[in-house]
Amino acid sequence: MTVRDPQRRAPPLPPAVFPPVDGGANDVPDDAHIAGSTGAPAPVEPPSIEPIAPARKPPARRFFIPEVIQSSKMDCGPAALKALLGGFGISVHYGRLREACRTSVDGTSIDTLEELAGAFGLDARQTVVPTDHVPLPAASALPALVVVKRPHLGNHFVVLWNRVGPYVQVMDPAAGRIWVRWSEFAPSTLKYRATVPTKDWRAWAESPAFLSPLDSRLRSLGVSRRDADALLDLARASEGWLGLGALDAAVRFCASLQQAGIVRGSEAQTVRAMVERVHASFEERFDLLPRPYWSVEGESPEDAMVASTGVLLVRARLATEVRAPGVLHTAEEGTALPKELQAALETRDERPEQELAKLLAGESRVGLALLTVGALVTPLGMICQTVLLRRLFDLAPDLGMGMQRVGAGVLVVGFLALLGALEAGVYAGMQRLGRVLEMRLRLAFIQKIPRLQDLYLQSRLSSDMAERSHMMHVVRGLPALAFTGARALVGLVATVVAIGMMDSRLWTGTIVLAVLSVVLPLAFRQRMTEQDMRARTQLGGLSRYYLDSLVGAVPLRAHGAQTALGREHEILLTGWMRSSLQLLRTMVSLRFVQATVGAALCITLLTLHLGSQGVTGGMLLVAYWIMGLPEHAQQLAGVIQGYPAARNVALRCMEPLGAPEVAPRPASPAPLTEVSRSQATGISLHGVSVEVSGHRLLHDIDLDIAPGSHVAIVGSSGAGKSTLLGVLLGWYPVASGSVRLDGRPLEPSDIEDLRTRTAWVDPAVQLWNQSIAANLTYGQEQVGSGDMARALESADLETALQHMQGGLQTRTGENGLRLSGGEGQRLRLARALLRPGMRLALLDEPFRGLDRTTRRKLLGRAREHWKDTTLLCVTHDVSETQGFDAVVVIEDGRVVERGTPEALLSVPGSRYRALLEGEAVAQGLLHDAPAWRRWRLEGGRLVE
Ligand SMILES: Nc1ncnc2c1ncn2[C@@H]1O[C@H](COP(=O)(O)OP(=O)(O)OP(=O)(O)O)[C@@H](O)[C@H]1O
């Protein structure tokens, strides 16, 4: 049965699938939500275009679903979708997908995920399936995206991939790929209750999607083929929902009695008796078959609507018909994907090996070639060394006493010294190469960060980015790892050849040992890569936790939230510990298997070799080489084990390098020092809507602001005032409509330039843990002392500075922690006032934390300073707005009123007037009522 948003245009449905239903979800999922049933706004409505892309060759479905781990709970939707697509061999770039889920795409909505799966090449259908039908092959419900409930994550998407015996393979973005018993997994699934027309339910219940699993359940009860057919025919003969519904409930009830050992054997008679009794006395149906056993319910047998309960899932198959990828197929036939999703489809996954090779492109080829030859020659040298020593022992009796013996000694020592020098050279070369690689990667990373688009940074945790940078040192070891691997391989091959040449009967045994040394670790490699990535991502989650806890340490203590914090820590730590333990177990298992197999083969080879000859020098040499084989094998295994970790780190560090960049800033004229009114920015918004994570924050905003005018923006909390300023700062790409500045459309390439001529004052502006002077002049090359003094005076900071021992050199602490809230705000204002030539000033609650008199004074000074600049001021102090050229009132993301303050005030019942009157009432109650005693803190003393 398909459950979808009734407000959205539904696709033509196949006959055995439910049409749109009245959702009636009993739970509102948290990080997963059912858009239709929670009343969320309709998602994605991209412009319609012709499908263009050619159909792709259908890839093969994998037995193991790839892991996609995500520590941020908002990303479980995209992570589950990426894994599902990966399981079908469809490649979608995960980074771009996450970024897309910060725009008009709601990655937490099951409707959107269904639609995206369709657009990326799957035949995906949202259905509600009775819980016990889900794992049955007859129901064909798997693979599917499933909503589950998790104690610390709320509702959460996972992929239910396949079933083997009693186990199902689940890809949980919070925990990775797990095998779990269905009986343990089933209780965690979200039970969804949908109200549907009885005729549609009946049509579905008569289809194989319902009848086949029901038949298979009947057979599992031990009911014979003939009896099962008779029961099904009887149920179908009954009109409406009751016949099939009662049979379904009776079978479920009998199965649970059988499981509990209460009844045994074929239950055909019991089931028939139960169904007949339900028909005979409908009112007592729940006494006969308790309610939890029913997957469908109606008020009467003839009820036109029924409530159907089951697991909510999106069932996925490879699309059978020829489809154009990148086109929405489910809801809006043939409409193009939003460009962010198109990017996810078109961007290829990162290949760290290639990228690392590119980083080394500047290195001398001769040097690299020499290093490679040196690394490969040294293991051969070791073989030659043993042969040489061995020959020396043979020749020793024949050598004369004098010069011959000295000459032989010099030859051997010279050879050993050459070999040692070669080893040292190769080692030093590898170390240097590692350092060069790390340094270039760090440089590329650091240079890339400022060029990353806002969307990228908004969709990543800062702690995650910090962890990537922190772990970059691992990349330094990659060249050494590669050379160690190559040397171990050459050493292994050379030893096998040497042994084979000495004793031809050992060829097979040594080759088997060598092949196993390579194949065994390779067989474990995929598993170790995934387990390492899982542990690493969970470590990233832990870093985020530590960072957040440190930043919020004071309020956490103040609110006594240590226990809750400890619990979260425990959950994260347990997850990480489990993943790390799994990885360790895999590594130890591999070592164990390899050591056991290696030892067994070595003993066999030695026995074979020693048994055939007496003790000779050559025999000892072969024995020495045989015993050295496991050593080479262990080295190789170590490299294959260490590689996933190093590759994962490299992959995470390289991921931002390929991300889209901000558009390059076109050459702009030299910044102005003074702005005249005609040079100020004129703003024109027409039909502007903004969507974040699929939720519409601004709706059809129409606004014209003349250059140099001062506009106040008011409205209740959460109305969308800051979002409107965010559009002008370029943070929110508009979903529809147009933004024009000075008559020209605002293009992504204009945003950097716009920001250089915009003064922004907001409590969110970061204060650096540096001196006040450094904070004031941040981002400016030269600031005159006169300008500095004027800015300090305008922002009323002079008196505050007099009380600070260090004066302008006083450090502000982390984000201004050592300043009072009001001082911090004044510092932010002074910083903005110091920037010359600003054509636009955006003030968002600029004086939060200051008293009313100071607020008025500072606002007056700011307006005087930017008198010819276009100024937009978001404020909750409505009375302050009366002197502005215009006022805009925003409610629920819409402009509900705009005009001069006088004009708005003159309209009885206007929103603006109501806000002003409400403020006056609150003011009277709080400040002017005689009942209050008035205390003031002056210089740290309380005075009345
Ligand atoms: N990055 C975001 N992702 C999702 N929703 C957001 C995001 N930023 C803001 N919102 C939501 O958009 C709505 C408008 O927020 P906005 O900050 O613009 O309100 P505001 O009018 O400035 O409120 P206040 O006066 O409290 O500052 C809020 O409901 C908020 O939860």
Image (cartoon, rainbow, N blue to C red):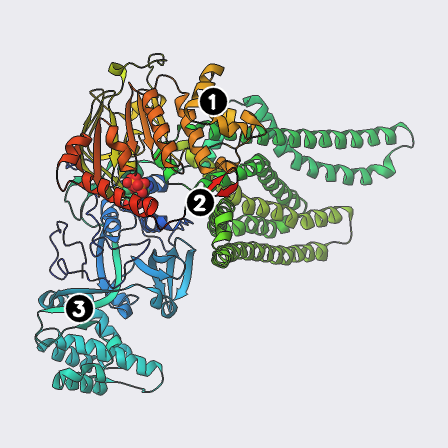
Q: Quadrant of the N terminus?
A: bottom left
Query: Image check: 815 left or right of 207?
Result: right
Specify the amino acid type for callout 2: Trp
- The residues tagged by marks 2 and 1 sit, at their Cα atoms, a distance apart of 37 Å
Q: Which residue in the protein does label 1 denote?
A: 777
Q: Which residue in the protein does label 2 denote?
A: 935
- Report the disc number at residue 307: 3
Residue at the (42%, 34%) spot, across then down: 656
Chain-order first, disc 2 or disc 1: 1
Looking at the image, which is closer to me, 256 or 23? Answer: 23
Residue 742, percent across and down? 22, 20
Residue 461, percent across and down? 42, 42
Specify the amino acid type for callout 1: Thr
Please determine whether, in this image, residue 875 is positioned above or below residue 932.
above
Residue at the (30%, 54%) spot, across then down: 32
Kindly report which numbered mark, 2 or 1, lies closer to the viewer in this rendering.
Answer: 2
- Rendered-image quarter of ligand 1: top left
Please determine whether, in this image, residue 238 is positioned above or below residue 510.
below
Chain-order first, disc 3 or disc 1: 3
Query: Image check: 853 left or right of 938?
Result: left
**Is residue 690 visible to the viewer in this orientation of the structure?**
yes
Residue 659, percent across and down? 38, 33
Chain-order first, disc 2 or disc 3: 3
Specify the amino acid type for callout 3: Ala
- The residues tagged by marks 2 and 3 sit, at their Cα atoms, a distance apart of 62 Å
Q: Tag 2: Cα neighbours inside 10 Å, few (<14), some, or many (≥20)?
A: few
Residue 117, percent across and down? 26, 48
Residue at the (35%, 16%) spot, across then down: 837
